[in-house]
Image (spheres, rainbow, N blue to C red):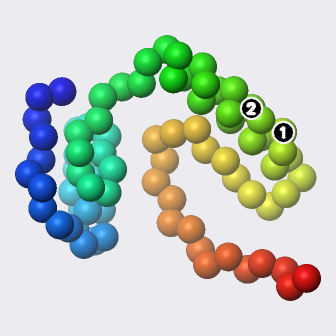
Amino acid sequence: MSSVLKHTRYTEAEYLAIERSATCKSEFQLYAMTDASREHNLITVSIAGELRSQLKRRPCEAYMNDIRVKAAEAQLPLS
C-alpha cells in the first residue's frame, strides 16, 4: 500500500468520519494497513476458537476482525 496519511492528531469524531469513508483498514493513529498473512490468519482462528469456547455461557462477545464497536461502561458485579 503506497498511500500514507500525514501524522495529524484527530478527535474520535474526526477519526470515525474519516474511517467511515476509508477504502483501507486503519487504526486510530491512521496508519494504512496491509492484509494479514496465512500464518497470521491461522493464529487468529485458533485464538478465536479458544475465546469462543471460554465465553460460551457468558454475556460476552468476541470478534475476529473487521468490526467497529463502542463498548458500554462495564457493569461488574460486586464481590
Numbered label attached to residue 53: 1
- Circle 2 is placed at which residue position? 49
In x, y percent, where is residue 44? 59, 29
Q: Is residue 74 left or right of residue 11?
A: right
Note whether 77 is above or below 63 in the view shown: below
Residue type at numbered disc 2: Gly
Query: Marks 1 and 2: CB-CB under 8 Å?
Result: yes
Q: Is residue 4 left or right of residue 34?
A: left
Note whether 12 is above or below 17 in the view shown: below
Q: Residue at x 59, y 74 (%)?
A: 72
- Along the line of sight, which residue is nearer the eye, 32 or 22? 32
Q: Is residue 61 left or right of residue 25?
A: right
State which quarter of the image contains the N terminus.
top left
Local packing at callout 1 (Cα closer than 10 Å; few below 14, some 14-19, many 20+) is few
Note whether 47 is above or below 78 in the view shown: above
- Along the line of sight, which residue is nearer the eye, 47 or 18? 47
Q: Residue furthest bottom?
A: 78
In x, y percent, where is residue 11? 24, 72
State which quarter of the image contains the C terminus.
bottom right
Q: Residue at x 61, y 78 (%)?
A: 73
Query: Is any part of residue 3 visible from this angle?
Result: yes
Could you tell me which secondary element the residue under label 1 belongs to? helix
Q: Residue 45 falls in which quadrant of the image?
A: top right
Could you tell me which secondary element the residue under label 2 belongs to? helix
Residue type at numbered disc 1: Ser
Q: Residue 75 falls in which quadrant of the image?
A: bottom right
In x, y percent, where is residue 43? 61, 25
Numbered label attached to residue 67: none
